[in-house]
Image (cartoon, rainbow, N blue to C red):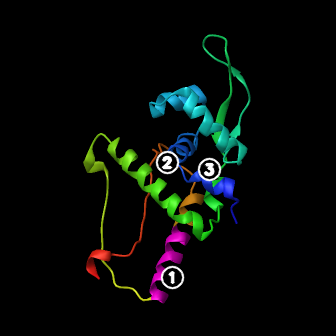
Amino acid sequence: MATEAEAKAVASAVRLRILRLCLDSPLTNKEIAQRLGANPATVLHHVRKLVDTGFLAPQGERVGARGAREIPYLATRKSWALQLGDEFRSDLSVAMLEVFRTEVAQVPDPAQVNTGRLGLRLNAEQYRELSRRFKDLFDELEQWQPGPGAEPYSLFVAIHPDAGRQ
């Protein structure tokens, strides 16, 4: 079960975006800040929280363009296996929705966003089964290795009560 510090670390849209940026290759604080369009000091605060909780790992020090010492960071993928308690799930869901909206807004061609929506009626057993199948699918996809010419994609799936249809 996640500690409170771990749960709080991933309940931030900025931190989730940092983890995504550092998923494939290590980035320095300056590079992360540039990609987020954010202040490097603010980003460093978030990076430190992610390092302190084990979600980012510092890589070997390198020398930057002007001779400055730079430390690139790589996501550890620890967040994938994180088990959150009920008291933290809603904060993470809100952060994930914010990240989704931000990332989709950055896609240059809206036709590249493949979406679908479906209204269902499920009993408790069907809901548990669907949730289990989502988890199994995500676990399977997480294990895939990129093939030749692989491009980065994100997958967002949500199931929620449809309060408007009650």
CA distance separating discs 3 and 2: 10 Å
Q: Residue at x 30, y 65 (%)?
A: 116
* Residue 100 coordinates in the image, percent (x, y): 41, 52
State whether residue 65 is above or below residue 119. Answer: above
Specify the label residue 13 is tagged with.
2
Residue 106 lies within the magenta run: no
Residue 161 falls left or right of residue 109: right
Q: Earlier in the sequence, mark 1 or mark 2?
A: 2
* Residue 42 coordinates in the image, percent (x, y): 55, 32
Q: Which residues are magenta?
A: 124-137
Q: Residue at x 54, y 70 (%)?
A: 135
Q: Residue at x 70, y 22 (%)?
A: 62
Specify the label residue 9 is tagged with.
3
Q: Are marks 1 and 2 in contact (CB under 8 Å)?
A: no
Mark 1: which secondary structure?
A: helix
Q: How many neighbours does mark 1 have within 10 angstroms: few (below 14), some (14-19), or many (20 or more)?
A: few
Residue that badge 1 annotates:
128
- Quarter of the rendering occupied by the C terminus: bottom left
